[in-house]
Image (cartoon, rainbow, N blue to C red):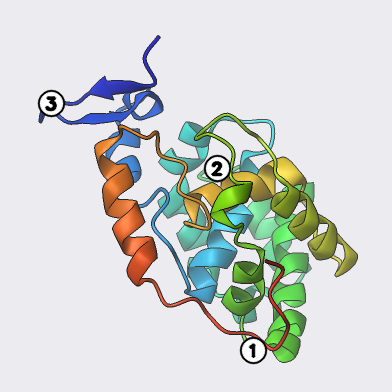
Amino acid sequence: MNATIVGHDGKPRCRWCSAAPEFLHYHDTEWGFPVSDDRRLFEKLSLEGFQSGLSWRTILLKRENFREAFHNFDFDQIARYTERDLERLLGDEGIVRHRGKIEAVINNAQRVQELIKREGSLAAFIWRYEPDRSQLAKPQTASTSVQSIALSKELKKQGWKFVGPTTVYAFMQAMGLINDHFEDCAIRVEVEAAREYFQRPVGGLASLH
């Protein structure tokens, strides 16, 4: 089976984006494009945690509900959530009502605040784990990497939850730390151009490269 599929516009794309109607726009406009906004990074890590054991389509269909329920993933606000907020979220049919995952988001929001005090931003910390080109596997052939394992380990050490290596690798794919579009996918060129002009956030610690 070919890795890509020809779209309605005649351009080849990663085959997975044809699996559901919602995937095409996400594939063409978000997946793999580099992100340096702390709130978007936190949102994606949170949603990847919710996806654990589920499909990305399930989460993508509910993404706007998640944003509304979690105050657009404003981690400063989430860090102040009380038991009342937890009960509100557990009763929200628009999201995934998994106590452990909801508690993880609240916990991780508090951990982000601590991390930002040390690093200056979540982005500066995350982008330290961008791999060298020489360390990349062929697109979409891996579910973890040396970097995702290292980032997962460090986040867990800092007290984060639901951030296993596979979850973190999916996050890195989506947020542009790697360009995992197939070689002949039309969007790969766009992502590569975006990565070329992307200004990497600078943190206080040395690069892992």
Q: Closer to the camera, 50 or 208?
A: 208
Would you name the residue on which mark 1 appears? Answer: 120
**Helix, strand or loop for disc 1:** loop
Q: Which circle marks residue 8 in the picture?
A: 3
Picture coordinates of residue 76 (x, y %)?
63, 81
Disc 1 from disc 3: Cα separation:
44 Å
Q: Quadrant of residue 5?
A: top left
Mark 2 and mark 3: span between their CA atoms? Answer: 35 Å
Residue that appears at 38% across and 57% down: 33
Task: Looking at this view, name the residue that lies furthest to the left.
Answer: 9
Residue where numbered disc 2 is placed? 93
Question: In the rendering, at what x and y percent does residue 155 appear?
Answer: 79, 63
Camera-side residue of 192 and 108: 192
- Residue displayed at 37% across by 35% down: 183
Q: Give the mark nearer the N terminus: 2 vs 3.
A: 3
Amino acid marked by disc 1: Gly
